[in-house]
Image (cartoon, coloured by chain):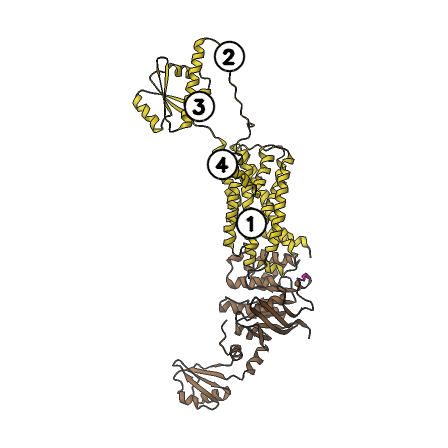
């Protein structure tokens, strides 16, 4: 009898079983893609809303600045004329406008609300610079100093660059852990493990088939994620060593499968397995940096993140896909994940039971 | 006769429970052998040891001349097993199910349709297992056990939870499998099923084999009276007690039951009085044997 034929046919059976499971398809494929669309959409085009300024009477300094604006000012500020001063001030109080501006002779008066500190600061800064440049223009001399600003990140490091690998990491983790734990518990409770034990097929073949199906599903998830993220509306730009994400993904899948195997070998019922899987995957997704970048996280959270295998998968994928680093930048993470896979597999083997009794 | 299975002095303990306590029996080639007993009698454990799922604490087991423990793939390919639960892969059709199990034994995929035909499920080939009725699922699981043409087949309570129609339907299939020359070992807690199907039965209780033999011989060995019953009022109770050959009579208001060791004499006398309206004659059954052996009613 050919071991390979058994392997192929078992893999086919498992794949059919998976592809006909609408719930699993939704949660492993569609659900994470929805998150990608939402996160990519919301944070991808992040712009600060304009400062709304009400002009009472004629404020010459403001009018001149707006008249000579080459576009920069219009992007951050919207000026509206208001005839009723009291009504305008009330609007600022209520937060419908950010500031009221009036000119009294040589004095530009700005009324702002302390409720929104950021907007208030922006408005004061803006008006201050308008007054400065008006003063400078009045002096008739060219400015002695100029300010030039530059962003530290590459222009391309937009939100989608971060969310594609990290949400994919979450999708892979939940598919891997769920897939393995559910399969193991279901097979044991339904007696399929027994049935397999009573067939002459080598047991490693059975498990190899399950791993192969998980790897195939993971690669499909990867391809779909990258394709969707590259749509013009999201605009992912892959780093030159993006192909390194493929071995990265596979190492991640092995690690999560082995964690799922531990849960599946330990849990007695499907419900337990499901609950424990959620308890592990969700915190891991949050603290492993799937939903927000860890760079901005508090230091205790950063330290904690090192215990989650997902952190390494996210980091490795982010390096080669999002940050455009070289292929070697994912190697340490691949190593860690393979280590997790081996340790998990050893524990699962110790806990493994053939039957529910 | 070749012995397909030989079991001697089998013992297995789980914690404080002595599940199997010195079981000895042999199954001959081509035989339909039944292991009978209530739940917890030790039948399933015995079967699991013989199949090679568990290691015995003590005793000898030989299946087709080999030891089933440790796992022996060469032996497993000659044995078919149908487990108590319908152990199917999820969301596969009946045909895919058979193809998958077949592939574990190196059986070509085309065999699946032959097997579906054999168990009368040809029209359900493309139906997913979740949509099959209890009887259909049970037939499919038997087809899965037979897909590689095994010499020896183990069936663990194949008719549990089936309606009477589906049970009878399944009995026909089981008889046919046995007629093809395969050895069958069946566990059941349906005494009637064992009587109908098995060449020999082992009656188990509390981890031991209480009796071993053909059902008819076990029943005859009981020397239990036959029971003849007619509708109440057809015959007076006193008249009935005085019939030639009658050991006793009882009337529960619905039917009059006469117990006798000479049913032909009683029936002849009743015929003479034209009192055979709705007559039923019941001999002793395996349930009576069980009652006699254990002193308690048989309750599965």
Neighbour tally class for label 3: few under 14, some 14-19, many 20 plus, Cα within 10 Å? some
Could you tell which of marks 1 and 2 lies nearer the N-terminus? 2
CA gap, disc 1 and disc 4: 25 Å
Which residue appears at 61% of the width and 43% of the height?
A337
Q: Chain of mark 4?
A: A
CA gap, disc 3 and disc 1: 49 Å
Q: Position of residue A40 (x, y in %)?
A: 50, 35
Q: Looking at the picture, do discs 3 and 1 lie on one chain? A: yes
Is disc 3 placed on a helix, strand or loop?
A: helix
Count of marks overlaid on the render? 4
CA gap, disc 3 and disc 4: 24 Å
Is disc 1 placed on a helix, strand or loop?
A: helix
- Residue that carries the numbered disc 3 in the rendered image: A76
- Residue that carries the numbered disc 4 in the rendered image: A39
- Residue that carries the numbered disc 1 in the rendered image: A179
Q: Chain of mark 1?
A: A
Which residue appears at 38% of the width and 25% of the height?
A98
Spot the residue most to the front.
A300
Front residue of B266 and B285: B285
Q: Colour of chain A?
A: yellow
Q: Position of residue B166 (x, y in %)?
A: 51, 67
Q: Position of residue B194 (x, y in %)?
A: 55, 73
- Residue that carries the numbered disc 2 in the rendered image: A144
Q: Is residue B201 above or below residue A148?
A: below
Could you tell which of marks 3 and 2 lies nearer the N-terminus? 3
């Amino acid at each position: 009898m050919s071991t390979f034929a058994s392997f192929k046919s078992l893999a086919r059976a498992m794949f059919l079983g998976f592809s006909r499971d609408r719930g699993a398809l939704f949660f492993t494929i569609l659900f994470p893609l929805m998150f990608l669309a939402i996160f990519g959409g919301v944070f991808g085009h992040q712009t600060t809303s304009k400062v709304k300024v009400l002009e009472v009477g004629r404020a010459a300094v403001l009018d001149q600045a707006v008249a000579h604006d080459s576009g920069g000012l219009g992007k951050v500020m919207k000026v509206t004329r208001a005839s009723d001063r009291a009504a305008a001030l009330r609007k600022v109080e209520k937060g419908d406008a950010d500031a009221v501006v009036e000119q009294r002779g040589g004095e530009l008066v700005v009324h702002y609300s302390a409720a929104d500190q950021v907007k208030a600061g922006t408005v004061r800064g803006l008006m201050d610079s308008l007054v400065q440049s008006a003063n400078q223009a009045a002096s008739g001399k060219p400015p002695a100093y100029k300010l030039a600003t530059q962003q530290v990140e590459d222009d391309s490091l937009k939100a989608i660059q971060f969310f594609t690998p990290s949400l994919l990491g979450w999708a892979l983790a939940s598919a891997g852990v769920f897939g393995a734990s559910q399969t193991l518990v279901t097979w044991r409770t339904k007696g399929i493990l027994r049935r397999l034990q009573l067939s002459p097929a080598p047991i490693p073949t059975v498990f190899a088939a399950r791993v192969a199906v998980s790897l195939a599903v993971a690669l499909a998830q990867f391809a779909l994620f990258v394709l969707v993220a590259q749509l013009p509306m999201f605009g992912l730009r892959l780093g030159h060593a993006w192909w390194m994400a493929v071995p990265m993904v596979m190492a991640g899948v092995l690690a999560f499968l082995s964690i799922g195997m531990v849960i599946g070998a330990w849990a007695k019922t499907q419900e337990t397995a499901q609950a424990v899987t959620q308890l592990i995957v969700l915190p891991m997704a949050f603290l492993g940096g799937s939903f927000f970048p860890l760079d901005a996280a508090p230091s205790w959270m950063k330290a904690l993140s090192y215990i989650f295998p997902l952190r390494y998968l996210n980091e490795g994928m982010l390096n080669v896909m999002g940050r455009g680093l070289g292929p070697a930048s994912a190697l340490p993470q691949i190593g860690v994940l393979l280590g997790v896979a081996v340790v998990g597999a050893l524990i699962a083997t110790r806990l493994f039971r053939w039957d529910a009794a | 006769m070749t012995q397909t299975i030989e079991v001697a002095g089998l013992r297995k303990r789980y914690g404080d429970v002595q599940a199997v306590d010195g079981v000895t029996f042999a199954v001959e080639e081509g035989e339909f052998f039944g292991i009978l007993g209530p739940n917890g009698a030790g039948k399933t454990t015995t079967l699991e040891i013989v199949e090679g799922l568990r290691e015995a604490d003590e005793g000898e087991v030989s299946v087709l001349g080999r030891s089933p423990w440790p796992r022996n793939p060469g032996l497993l390919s000659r044995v078919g097993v149908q487990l108590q639960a319908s152990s199917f892969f999820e969301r596969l059709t009946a045909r895919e199910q058979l193809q998958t199990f077949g592939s574990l034994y190196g059986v070509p995929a085309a065999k699946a349709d032959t097997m579906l035909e054999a168990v009368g499920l040809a029209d359900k080939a493309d139906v997913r297992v979740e949509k099959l009725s209890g009887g259909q699922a049970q037939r499919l699981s038997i087809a899965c056990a037979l897909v590689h043409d095994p010499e020896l087949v183990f069936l663990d309570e194949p008719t549990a939870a089936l309606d009477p129609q589906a049970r009878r339907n399944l009995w026909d299939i089981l008889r046919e499998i046995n007629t093809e020359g395969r050895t069958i070992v069946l566990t059941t807690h349906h005494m009637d099923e064992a009587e109908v199907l098995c060449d020999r039965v082992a009656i188990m209780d509390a981890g031991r084999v209480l009796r071993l033999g053909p059902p008819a011989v076990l029943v005859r060995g009981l020397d239990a009276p036959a029971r003849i019953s007619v509708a109440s009022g057809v015959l007076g109770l006193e008249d009935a007690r005085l019939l030639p050959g009658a050991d006793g009579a009882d009337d529960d208001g619905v039917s009059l039951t006469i117990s006798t060791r000479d049913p032909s004499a009683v029936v002849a006398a009743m015929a003479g009085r034209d009192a055979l309206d709705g007559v039923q004659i019941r001999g002793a059954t395996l349930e009576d044997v069980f009652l006699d052996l254990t002193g308690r009613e048989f309750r599965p």
